[in-house]
Amino acid sequence: MEDAAVLTRAAARRRGLAAKESGALEKTGRRLNQRRPRRRIKEDAEEEATVFREVVNFNPDPLPVRYYDKETTKPISFYLSSLEELLAWTPLMEDSFNVALQPLECRQPPLSSHRPRTLLCHDMMGGYLEDRFIQGSAVQNPYSFYHWQYIDIFVYFSHHMVTIPPVGWTNAAHRHGVCVLGTFITEWTDGAKLCEAFLAGDSRSYQTVADQLVQIAQFFHFDGWLINIENSLSAVAVQNMPVFLRYLTAQLHQRVPGGLVLWYDSVTQSGQLKWQDELNEHNRVFFESCDGFFTNYNWKEEHLERMLGQAGERLVDVYVGVDVFARGNVVGGRFDTDKSLELIRKHGFSAALFAPGWVYECLEKSSFFQNQDKFWNLLERYLPTHSICSLPFVTSFCLGMGTRRVCYGQEQAVGPWYHPSAQETQPLFGEHKLPGDNRGWVKVHCCLADSWHGGSSLLLEGVIPPEVGNIAVRLFSLQVPLPHKVFLSLVYKLEGPTDVMVALELTTGDASSCHIGSISSLNETGSRHRPRPLRVPPTKLARWAGRCGQQLSGGWIQRCYEVNMRGCLLRDLFVNLSRPPGSQEAESFICRLGEIQVVDANSLLAPLPQVQGVTVTQVRWQQPSSEVEAPSGHLRLSCTLHWSYLLLQARCFRIYCSERRRGRSASRGLPGPEKPMFLGLAFVNQYRVVDLMVEAAGPSQEGHVEFLVEPVPREGFQVPQAEWGRAALLYSAPP
């Protein structure tokens, strides 16, 4: 089989360049040093690890209930249930767990364009299910959404008054250039009383509520609010509602770049709770006071026709609601949702898909992926895609779940896991037949059976017919202004006997100014073009290119390329599958993709930041519940790690531990640490270790457990272990 190649082909011109990514992540956890537990003594560094001492105590200080699961002390996402809770909220260290690491990726076209948009409103069984566990959980067959390129806005919906989106959803959506909204909802008699409390008074009351909502969105790094008032309002309250909306919208725009406030079709300007199923003279005052209007679901085409006059130039700011469960008198839902979308797009409106998790809730879990792909494939022609427009572009196609964890081809842990923050950029999925009467086809779908990195990979299956030389599968739509030199990498493997050749293909826009220079392979012998090797490669470049051109474990192959170009705009990424020379037969193939990387070469020349100041706090000791859980002589340890790192340069952090016993007498010698054990992933600069089994310290002995924090750079490579952060916890039995 020949080596893979990088192909280029000119594409049509595309005006406009990507806007620079704006804003920066706030530093969190600033109150850590104020909350250091008692009985802990920090010592000088030993073997590059800061050391903390602890006397085992089975009566720990209680943890704040809102932020931790009662049974496990795992950090959880939370909501606010009352006006009192909303007004009392102020950021604490524990809130930092729920702050999104991933900034909103630059995208084209921008959300502010006049193209009709697609909103997904996620409502599943009350919300805050397994997705509430910030560090992930061990659930089997969880719900996962991965058709992000069709979505512009994601709303996390629940019936709690202030629904703060679980951070895993915000990280995953932002990675795909999709903005995220929480929900502010009031309902029934209690909702009417709540609205009266903050809307029927003077302006300070509703401004304070708006200021808190803006502060929450700004702190947790999501992008705004859906306002859903499902109760009647008094004359004073309804009069103040548009003023509240205008103030909330203005403040959000000032403090959250690209922020949005949307209004749900429920209350009319008279204060009556009466769903209109359209934008009209009874509710237009709310539409005019915010960024958009989300209609109720029981509309017909005549409603859409009437709205054309009501919306004026803001047609795309009207999100016509579609209940995927098809409750009520609707045009279409379930697998007939395309009927509703056809009418919505015919009249130029945006669409709001409510509860597309129907495919998970109501159909067989064993067929979830097939049903989800079927649902979105039926809608594809009505869902324009958007493009990512920044580098580095790195994805292992991980869905944020799996039946085992793999790290660059090496198995880390076996067992089911679910961690939405770990979902990486997803491609365009689908099944395509080649034009004409030939037998060629290709299907692109996710697969949990094998992975290169994470828990899943991308599977390309198909047939190249005799009359066709190759099939090019478009995976990603991009709008990336390319620097002078980029490095590209493809990790793949072919399954079964086949001679099909695999290549990474890219298209460039603005062909008149785009000049493509040399294309050469990195670290490959026998290549026609070889780059001049660096005598002493910088750490980041050496780590990135270390596996290039090698046959890797599990049958994976990695190919790396250096491309020099000038004035080019990267438009699309394809994988090209071609028949071997001389072949006249139909060629079947199963190609598994493990990773694609497009990296600015200059970014690999920059120094690598280091994890610093790892601390161990909030220690909790427990006895094992039974000998089945752990043999005698063991304890369950939970604690919180915190560290400093330049978060804008991190994709995430991998957390490990190693354990050893040591006596107080120096003459006894110290055994070496065991191979580090993987604990989990962190997407902030702190991690809660939960129920780690360690040996109990005997008389005149100290237990010793070391925690290690591995940073994962945005370019996606392994950092040398010598540059990880470390902290050691030495613990002894009570006297």
Image (cartoon, rainbow, N blue to C red):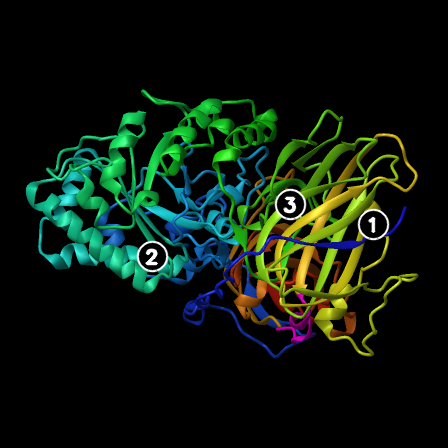
> The residue tagged with tag 3: helix, strand or loop?
strand
Q: Who is closer to the viewer here, 162 or 23?
A: 23
Q: Amino acid at mark 2?
A: Ile
Horizontal relation, residue 261 to residue 104: left or right: left
Q: Which of disc 3 and disc 1 is earlier in sequence?
A: 3
Look at the image and give the residue range highlighted in magenta: 600-609
Q: Which of disc 3 and disc 2 is earlier in sequence?
A: 2
Residue 68 on the magenta segment: no
Q: Who is closer to the viewer here, 290 or 6?
A: 6
Q: CA distance from mark 2 to mark 3?
A: 36 Å
Q: Are marks 1 and 3 in contact (CB under 8 Å)?
A: no
Horizontal relation, residue 222 to residue 461: left or right: left
Q: Nearer the viewer, mark 1 or mark 3?
A: 3
Q: Position of residue 606 (x, y in %)?
A: 65, 75
Residue of label 1:
553
Residue of label 3:
475
Q: Is residue 500 visible?
A: yes
Q: Amino acid at mark 3?
A: Leu
